[in-house]
Image: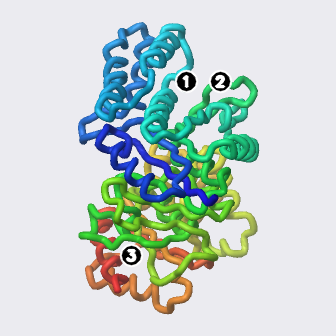
Amino acid sequence: MNSKTVKFGGSSVADGIQLQKIKNIIEADPERRYVVVSAPGKRFADDNKITDLLFLCKAQADRNIPYEQLFHVVMDRYRAIQYNLGIDVDLDSRFETIHMALQEGCTEDYIVSRGEFLSAILVAAYLGYDFVDTQDLILFNSKGRLLAEETNQALSAELAKHERAVLPGFYGSYQDTGEVCILSRGGSDVTGSLVARAAGSSIYENWTDVSGLLMADPRIVDDPRPIEYISYMELRELSYMGASVLHEEAVFPVRQAGIPINIRNTNAPEDPGTIITTESTYDNRRILSGIAGKQPFTVINIYKSMMNSEIGFVRRALAILEDLRISFDHIPTGIDSFSVVIEKEAIEDQLEEVISAFEQQLHPDDISVIEDIALIAVVGLGLSRTVGVASRITTALSAQGINIRMLNQGFSEINVIVGVDAADFRPAIRAIYDAFSE
Ligand code: ASP
C-alpha cells in the first residue's frame, strides 16, 4: 500500500485545536500513514516553546536553581491537550520518569527530547496509530553525526511492522551507547525526511504555519507570488541566502530517494503549498523561481598588475583565510584583480589581520575594503534558457537609480548574484521582483 509521510511542526501540535486540524488532515487521505511530530510550539507570539522550556529546566537543575515551576508549565501544556481532546493515556507516570531523570542528572539531550516523545505519545493515542519511538532507530556515531544507512535500515525494518504510526521528531541515539542524541534545532524536519525515505513514501508532506515558499520576502515585496514548484537545487540557493522554511539537512534523505517534499499549511489545508522536487521531474514554467538576499558583507579587493599570469595567487590568498578559519561567500575575479566577499560578522574582528597578511604574503599593488554590501540572489532553473536576464536586472536597478557594485553569474546559470549597497537592499529586491513578474 502506498504511503505518505507527514510531519507536523510545533505550531501544528501546539494545542487541542491544532491537533483537531491535524486529525482532519490525516483522515482526509488514507495514504497519510506515517506521522512525525515536533514538540508543542507557540500558540501566540509571546508563548513558550516546550523545547525551550525543557532546555531551561535542565539549565536550572544543573545550577541548583529550582526548576519545578517550569516543569509544571510543561506538564500543564500536555495535560491541557489531553483533557481538551479526551485522550486516554497515562501521562503522570511519564512525567514522573522525566522528573526523576532530571533529579539524577541525566543528559540535556534526554530531557529536551522528551518534548517530542510526549507529543508523539499523545498524537498516537488521539489518532489511534501505533507509537514508534525513534530512539533506537535514528542512529548517530559517537561524534553525533547521523549514520544515514544504518538509520535507514533500522527505520525501514520497524516501519514494515506498522501499518500506521506516529513517531517523535528531533532525536535518536548514539549507536554505541544507546543514549539519546538530539538533532540541531528544527531537526524534526530531518526525522520526517528519514522516515519518508525509509517508508518509501510517495511524498513527504511538511505541515507548518505558512502555505509554502513565496517568491520573495513578504516584508520587502507586497504580496509576493507563492512558489508552486521548486527544485532542490534552487531551494538550496534560496535558503543559503536567507529564505528558510525547512531544516537544511532535511533535503538530503528524500532527495537521494527521489521523493518530493510538499510544504503545506495546517491552518489552510486547501492551499497546495510548495512542491520541492528533483531537477529532472521539475516542471519549469517560470524564468525566475525566487529572490532572496543577505547582508551585510565586507568585500576585500586585491589588485596586482599581471596577476593573471602569477600562478597560485588566489590560492595563497584563500589559504590565508583558511588558516584564520574565515569562510568566504564569493570570489569574483577580474584580470589583474579579484575580490573576496565575506559576511561582515565572520571577519569583523580579524579584518586588520587579514589585510596585513594579504599585504605581506601577496605583495599586491593595492588593497581596498568595501563595507556594508548586500547580496541578492536571483534564482531559477529557467534563467539558463532565457536570453537577456542580466539586462532585465540591470535595467530595473538603473531605473531606480541603484548602483550595482557586483554582478555574478556562474556557468550553472541557476542564479545571478547582485551586490548593492546595504542601503539599496530592499528597493533592489522590489525592482528585480517587479522586472520578472509576468
Ligand atoms: N522541537 C525542536 C525545536 O524546537 C525540534 C523541532 O521542532 O523540529 O527545535
Query: Which residue matches tag 2?
Result: 179
Residue 303 visible in the shown view = no
Whole-Å distance between the Cαs marked 3 and 1?
50 Å
Residue type pointed to by label 2: Glu
Which residue is pictured at 36% across the width and 43% down the height? 19
Query: Which residue matches tag 3?
Result: 404
Of callouts 2 and 3, the N-terminal one: 2
Residue 87 visible in the shown view = yes
Residue type pointed to by label 3: Ile
Of callouts 3 and 1, the N-terminal one: 1
Which residue is pictured at 44% across the width and 52% down the height? 26
- Circles 2 and 1: CB distance less than 8 Å? yes
- Is residue 352 placed above or below 2 in the rendered structure? above
Whole-Å distance between the Cαs marked 2 and 1?
8 Å
* Residue 25 picture quarter: bottom left
Of callouts 2 and 1, the N-terminal one: 1
Tally of numbered discs? 3
Query: Which residue matches tag 1?
Result: 110
- Is residue 196 placed above or below 14 in the rendered structure? below
Q: Secondary structure at mark 2?
A: loop
Mark 3 crowdedness (10 Å alpha carbons): few <14, some 14-19, many ≥20: some
Residue type pointed to by label 1: Tyr
